[in-house]
Image (cartoon, helix red, strand yellow):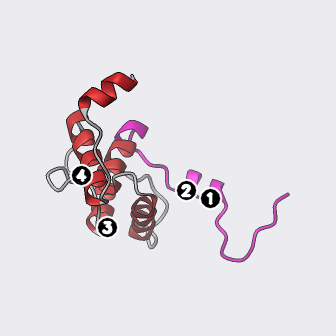
Amino acid sequence: MAEHRVGDVRPTQLLHTYPIQVSIETLVQHCYLLSGGLIGILSRFMQELACLVSNEAPRALHFQDCALAAESVEGTGHPAHPAFMKPQVSPVELTQAHIHTLETNGMSVPSLSKLQAAA
């Protein structure tokens, strides 16, 4: 059996105490809009989500909870498509968020012809 230090949280504590009542597809898409794929921003969002309910009795987390947590995180996604503002995310919004993250970090954006050739 794995040894746990003081302050460690066992994964089962989180999974069974605060289930997220948002589909995995919706959650992932909105997390990408918020973070642009940058793990540090995703981590900060999850910390904010945990803090949001830290003084409440265990309950399910909903889309609105995610929206409130996202308000406290400085995201890197496309400014025209903030995360958790509306339930559905279009492929265009995801692509624009990806391009925005690449450009913001000084990376080149692949051209459509290069993408098609690679496919």
Residue 11 in magenta stretch: yes
Instruction: Give amino acid for label 1.
Output: Gln
> Percent position (x, y) of residue 86?
20, 45
116 lies left or right of 38: left
User: Which of the two residues, 117 or 54, is positioned nearer the viewer here?
Assistant: 117
User: Which of the two residues, 2 or 57, is positioned nearer the viewer here?
Assistant: 2
Instruction: Give amino acid for label 3.
Output: Val
Which residue in the protein does label 2 denote? 17
Instruction: Give amino acid for label 2.
Output: Thr
Q: Earlier in the sequence, mark 4 or mark 2?
A: 2
Q: Earlier in the sequence, mark 3 or mark 4?
A: 3
Query: Can you name the residue that lies furthest to the bottom here?
Result: 6
Q: Residue at x 44, y 64 (%)?
A: 40
Q: Quadrant of residue 46?
A: bottom left
Q: Are marks 2 and 1 in contact (CB under 8 Å)?
A: yes
> Percent position (x, y) of residue 105?
31, 60
> Percent position (x, y) of residue 96?
22, 44
Residue 117 in magenta stretch: no
The main secondary structure of the magenta stretch is loop
Quadrant containing the C terminus is top left
The span shown in magenta is 1-26
Q: Residue at x 34, y 42 (%)?
A: 29
